[in-house]
Image: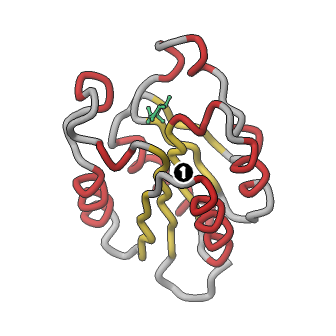
Amino acid sequence: MNADPSPTVFVLNGVNLGTLGKRRPEVYGTLTLDDIEILLRSEFPGVNFEFRQTDYEGEMVGFIREAAKGDGLLINPGAWTHYAYALHDALETVPVPKVEVHLSNVHARETWRRHSVVTPAVSAVVAGMREWGYVAATRYVLEQRRG
Ligand code: DQA
């Protein structure tokens, strides 16, 4: 728990999420990742966001470890969701509220997207709410902090 009155929330975006806006807008929406960051900062002006994206799994593991110093963590692992056990193992060591976020409804798509190897290591999952999933997940981690 961070003693600073302004909470820190890590928002970690994985592989291919840097192409949002151009990538399959009918599935993921038209907002870019920058737009989602702007939305979060405007919805929660009192929150210190550490907003990150990487296409490198090892770098993501480093971000997850770093998030231990914050008050909550949102992670959209992209396709890593479905097979990256190293992300699961990194997440289970970080003792803050953690939410797995998916822009699309992964349960209504290809069968292989229905399984997440990350879910057992997080507190909650949001899928199919597009950018509003990030907003809802932030609200949730802030509520957890209040206890
Ligand atoms: C995603 C869903 C994943 O299956 C996919 O590989 C992504 C994005 C989502 O936000 O809906 O890259 O995590």
Q: Which residue extends farthest bottom?
A: 4
Q: Residues within 10 Å of mark 1 (few under 14, many from 20)?
A: many
Where is residue 121 drawn, in percent x and y? 75, 46
Q: Is residue 2 above or below residue 136?
A: below
Q: How is the image coloured?
A: secondary structure
Where is residue 100 drawn, in percent x and y? 57, 43
Mark 1 lies on residue:
75
Q: Residue at x 63, y 82 (%)?
A: 2
Q: Residue at x 65, y 60 (%)?
A: 61
Q: Quadrant of the C terminus?
A: bottom right
Residue 63 lies in what quarter of the image? bottom right
Q: Can residue 104 be spotted in the picture?
A: yes
Q: Quadrant of the N terminus?
A: bottom right
Q: Nearer the viewer, residue 100 or 16?
A: 16
Q: Is residue 50 above or below residue 116?
A: below
**51 relative position to 82: left or right:** left
Q: Is mark 1 within 8 Å of ligand 1?
A: no
Where is residue 66 drawn, in percent x and y? 63, 73
Q: Kindly identify the amino acid type of the residue bearing the numbered disc 1.
A: Ile
Q: Is residue 119 above or below residue 24?
A: below
Q: Nearer the viewer, residue 3 or 13?
A: 13
Q: Residue at x 24, y 61 (%)?
A: 38
For numbered disc 1, what is the local secondary structure?
strand
Where is residue 106 drawn, in percent x and y? 50, 23
**11 relative position to 144: left or right:** left
Q: Can residue 146 be spotted in the picture?
A: no
Q: Residue at x 41, y 48 (%)?
A: 134
